[in-house]
Amino acid sequence: MKYSEIMVRYGELSTKGKNRRVFIGQLGHNVRQVLKQFDGVTVDAQRDRMHVSLHDQDAGPVMDTLQKVFGIETFSPVVKLEKNTPIEKIQETALEMISNQFKNGETFKISTNRQNKDYPLNTYQMNDEVGGYVLDHLKGIEAQMKHPDINLQIDVRMSGIYLSSQTIQGALGLPVGTGGRGTMMLSGGIDSPVAAYMAMKRGVKLDMIHFYSPPYTSEQALAKAKDLTAKLSALGGTVDFIQVPFAKIQEEIKEKVPEGYLMTVQRRMMLRIAAAITIARHCDGVFTGESLGQVASQTLESMRAINDVTNLPVLRPLLSLDKTEIIKIAEQIDTYDLSILPYEDCCTIFTPPAPKTKPKVEKAREFEQNIDVDGLMKEALDGIKISKIHPDDDYLNANEDVFSELL
């Protein structure tokens, strides 16, 4: 079936009152960003619904992309006809649309909404004419007014006649960019992409901060983090990826800090740097993928000792989730297979055999005096690199030949 457009319906945006226009405008912007890969597709975000005009593009890939975008409740592939289209053309289009979905024994109904009162057939006549035509031309189908398998909707509007027969669930949530701005401490593991997903679902626009430590971490590990960011950018548009050199800091901590506090001081330095980047980029909070009690650095005592370095909100969307729950979400959002690729990030190197699970703030401050906190921070911040990540970017596969030479 060749569709003309995708009709998008808003979810939670309908409750936003006077701010509704802002939310719809942001959603329109996000949809345009993620659909840039489809030549000719245009987006018209109106007050009641959004129209994504396909201009001969295949509807399937466009709908797959729309299904990930936060702020969309449902959407439908639509065939648009001219407002004065004769009933015969409407009948033929309806039959083709239902035939593409129909399985033997299923039922259908026609539901007409007539905004254009000048059209010669009224609502009941349209239902009767189109429904009768389908019954006459499609063997095995039956009409059913309550709970039909296929409900073909005909909207007779001033701008045209719209036919649709599928309603597809969207991602819900709020459009990314309507919930403020934050940064995300993104590793290459399972947890932090899921935490980013959950923050973005509430409309937060995130910049991804990734700490990398060459030569201890590989180019593949960096590419994996960028590919995870590309997956997340499909939720609401382009994402800034900020890579921070961290090897020198880790080396100095390993040399000068007692083993039990290596992890605590390392995480304190990460959060210090992330907080400085957050403030410099006019964001209002730092998100992490921590889950309470999952590892030694994620006990309540550890979190207190690490949070000590900043007054910014440190937000942990996964705080109360079990690992199995986090993995399930990662599988649903298609980040799990990437996350488990065996490329170590900087969080997995220099890991002490027995890190403190109940570190003391005072001890952490004391041991930090052994390192040049300000100098190391400045060097790391001076060395950051920022790149724009788009939904269709692919770093691991794009650099496959380069990576093979490193093996």
Image: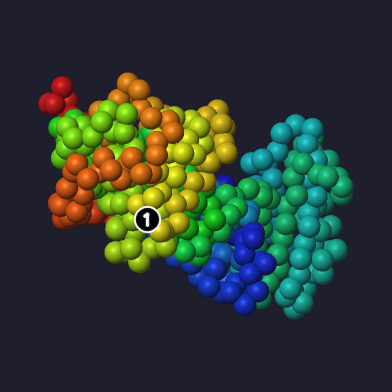
Q: Residue 220 is drawn in which quadrant?
A: top left
In which quadrant of the rendered image does the C terminus lie? Answer: top left
Q: Where is residue 287 in the image (x, y as percent from the top left)?
A: 43, 50
Looking at the rendered structure, the secondary structure element under dot 1 is: loop
Mark 1 neighbour class, 10 Å CA radius: few under 14, some 14 to 19, many 20 or more: some
Residue type at mark 1: give it: Thr
Residue at 23% x, 34% y: name it.
257
Q: Nearer the viewer, residue 222 or 36?
A: 222
Residue at 30% x, 40% y: name it.
265
Left or right, residue 272 beside residue 161: left
Q: Is 252 located above or below residue 12 in the figure?
A: above
Q: Position of residue 299 (x, y in %)?
A: 47, 35
Q: Which of 308 and 169 is in front in this view?
A: 308
Q: Residue 156 is drawn in which quadrant?
A: bottom right
Q: Nearer the viewer, residue 59 or 47?
A: 47
Count numbered badges in the picture: 1
Q: Position of residue 120 (x, y in %)?
A: 77, 73
Residue at 58% x, 74% y: name it.
19
Q: Residue 84 is drawn in which quadrant?
A: bottom right
Q: Position of residue 20 (x, y in %)?
A: 60, 72
Left or right, residue 96 beside residue 236: right
Residue at 69% x, 45% y: name it.
98
Q: Mark 1 points at which residue?
A: 310
Q: Is 51 located above or below residue 201 in the figure?
A: below
Q: Is 362 located above or below residue 237 in the figure?
A: above
Residue 294 appears in the rendering: yes
Left or right, residue 259 beside residue 229: left
Q: Which of 394 and 282 is in front in this view?
A: 282
